[in-house]
Amino acid sequence: MTNPEKPEAWRERLEQHLLDNGLRMTRQRLIIAEAFFGASGHPNIDELYEQVKAEDPSVGQATVYRTLKLLVDSGLANQSHFGDGTTRYESSHREHHDHLICDDCGVIVEFRNETIERLQDRIAEEHGFTVLEHEMVIHGRCNDADCPRRPSRRP
Amino acid sequence: MTNPEKPEAWRERLEQHLLDNGLRMTRQRLIIAEAFFGASGHPNIDELYEQVKAEDPSVGQATVYRTLKLLVDSGLANQSHFGDGTTRYESSHREHHDHLICDDCGVIVEFRNETIERLQDRIAEEHGFTVLEHEMVIHGRCNDADCPRRPSRRP
DNA sequence: GTAGATGCAAATAGTTTGCAGCAAT
DNA sequence: ATTGCTGCAAACTATTTGCATCTAC
């Protein structure tokens, strides 16, 4: 799967972060990071844990939690909350974007609107705030012909 | 405190909702609703429960949860999530607005921007979605002179 | 009288943490 | 060798739920 000749950008960034903070690269962290960066969509801990277990059943769930926290701290991952009670993660190598989520089928549409981005910054500035991050989630119905119109727990 | 001659709007709306759905007005529901509508800011269940206990220590926490769910169902309350792990509530009698929160002192600034509101609707429409609701939270630092620059759990 | 509501405690669900042993540097 | 890391289980936090009892209608 992975080409050993061409280390991906996330791996270099992760190793640099570990180095900078006196932390260590481990087999588990590599497996978890590979699962995360190879995943599509917005996996939560359970979904990542399932993938990781398939690769190596000896990895514990707590390590998945700890590693995802590490990825967030290192700036390689971002958290999102879509209302299903779990924390979901996505790679931060892409530009910041917001989410549109169908409450019936759980499909997630990502979008980025420059006007909204600019307005958010301006509004924060007007109130004297320095923006750290912002999260915007629009909940709705996707109205797709094949939307099962059922509550989904798997965005 | 409360003027018995002038029932507040929320009370009429609540009683109508109860009537429409074959539900009942109880002493507990009244106490909890009074605490909620009398509260400022964005209380969570624990904060409301403390207030309610001061009024009547026999009320159980589960009833506070159940009553807030009732208020949300009846359209009298809205939920928000500010990242401290709890669900916070606010009266929905005011116009929809978004939140700017200081991650250091926990202060919450409410704002409403018509351009953003319109853009959210338009973006959803462009993707074929029917909007149910949207939540936007900007996290940052308020930069106030007296901002204690400490993690607060009490927005 | 009857169906809905309550308080309590137990159950869930997601996440965190203490600790003894393991392993990367 | 040292210190960080891991798996496991127990602990925690927020919330929900089963049930016997109570109460608004």
Image: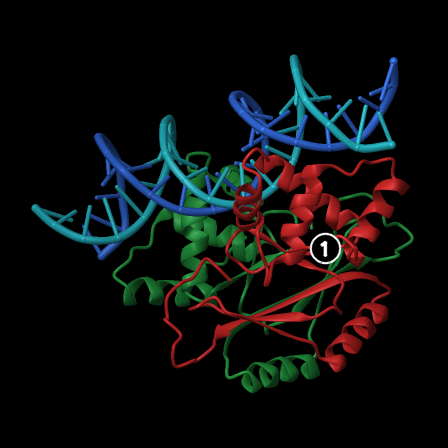
Chain colours: A red, B green, C cyan, D blue
Residue D4, placed above or below residue A25: above
Residue closest to the eye, A50 or A137: A50
Write the residue at 74% across / 44% down: A70
Side (left or right) of B141 relative to A50: right
Image point (80%, 36%), residue name: A24
Q: Chain of mark 1?
A: A
In x, y percent, where is residue A126? 84, 71
Q: For this rendering, which residue is in front, A129 or C5?
A: A129
Q: Is residue A124 above or below residue C23?
A: below
Please name the amino acid that badge 1 sits on.
Ala
Residue A18 percent coordinates (x, y): 83, 41
x, y percent for residue A49: 56, 44
Q: Is residue B151 visible?
A: yes
Left or right of C9? Residue B127 is right
Q: Quadrant of residue B79?
A: bottom right
In front of the other: A141 or A111: A111
Alpha-carbon neighbours of circle 1 within 10 Å: few (<14), some, or many (≥20)?
A: many
**Pick the front one: A102 or A51:** A51
Disc 1 is placed on an element classified as strand
Would residue B46 be found to the left or right of residue A94 on screen? left
Quarter of the picture containing the N terminus of chain A is bottom right
Instruction: Report which residue position mark 1 lands on.
Output: A77
| Number of numbered discs on residues | 1
Residue drawn at x 74%, y 37% as measured from the top left: A26
Q: Which residue lies at the image location 55% right of the left edge and 83% below the top edge?
A: B127
The answer to whether residue B46 is seen in the rendering is no
